[in-house]
Amino acid sequence: MTTTTLDVQIDVCPNGDAEAMRLEYDVYLAEGYIEPNDERVVLENRNYPEFVHFVARVDGRAIGSLRLVTDAQPRHDVFRLGSFRHFSVQHWATDLLRSADQRRIVEVGTMVILPEYRGGSTYAQLFRKAFEYAVLSRVHYALATIDEGFYHRLIKRGLPFREMGETRYYMGSYTVPAIIDVEQLMRMMFGPQASGASARPAQAALSPMPMQPALAS
């Protein structure tokens, strides 16, 4: 089953959605990323940085979610999420992030989609909504750890991602730590006059981006 013929609603939930958090636990447990616990939560996510939850629902039921970390305060050197500690990040990237306005940096965190809804449009709709949010919030840089195969497909589509460090096996697949210049993407899509405050790209959002269905936090 895919979501292409279903009415998928994307909700924007600052500081989290309880149903989406339960979904994260269920998917992580099924994928073998975590051990079961009585709290039925992903324990590593309990002290999560400030974030916005994008939740995909069908008939009111959460079937997918994505966390976009908006916290302006780095916790792990220049990063908010501990996942980046598993990678050797190049100096140019850390220097760039240290010099940037911390309020204009976001990190893509946990992403999960129920298996029966993978392969459809759900992931694309989640990323479109996150991209819209980033543009409206005048984000400059977005950071993510991306499955290696998907990363190279994104590059072939012309998206201005750049590797920040070595590819490593992490959370079930070979993974690339990457950065995308949101302002550069805006200029590529809409010309040199494109403004980070414009909502226009939300309507002409990126073609479906095949990211990991269960992205580690």
Image (spheres, rainbow, N blue to C red):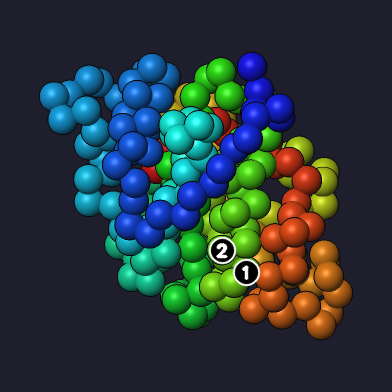
Q: Is label 1 in contact with label 2 (beta carbons under 8 Å)?
A: yes
Task: Say which mark, if any, is on residue 135.
Answer: 1
Quadrant in the picture for residue 92: bottom right
Rendering coords of residue 188 (x, y %): 82, 66
Q: Say whether residue 170 is visible.
A: no
Rendering coords of residue 49 (x, y %): 31, 58
Q: Residue at x 37, y 38 (%)?
A: 20
Q: Is residue 35 above or below residue 210?
A: above
Q: Say whether residue 75 is visible.
A: yes
Judge left or right: residue 121 versus residue 106.
Answer: right
Q: Secondary structure at mark 1?
A: helix
Q: Which residue is mark 2?
A: 133
Q: Residue furthest front?
A: 59
Q: Residue at x 83, y 70 (%)?
A: 190
Q: Amino acid at mark 1?
A: Val
Task: Say which mark, if any, is on residue 92.
Answer: none
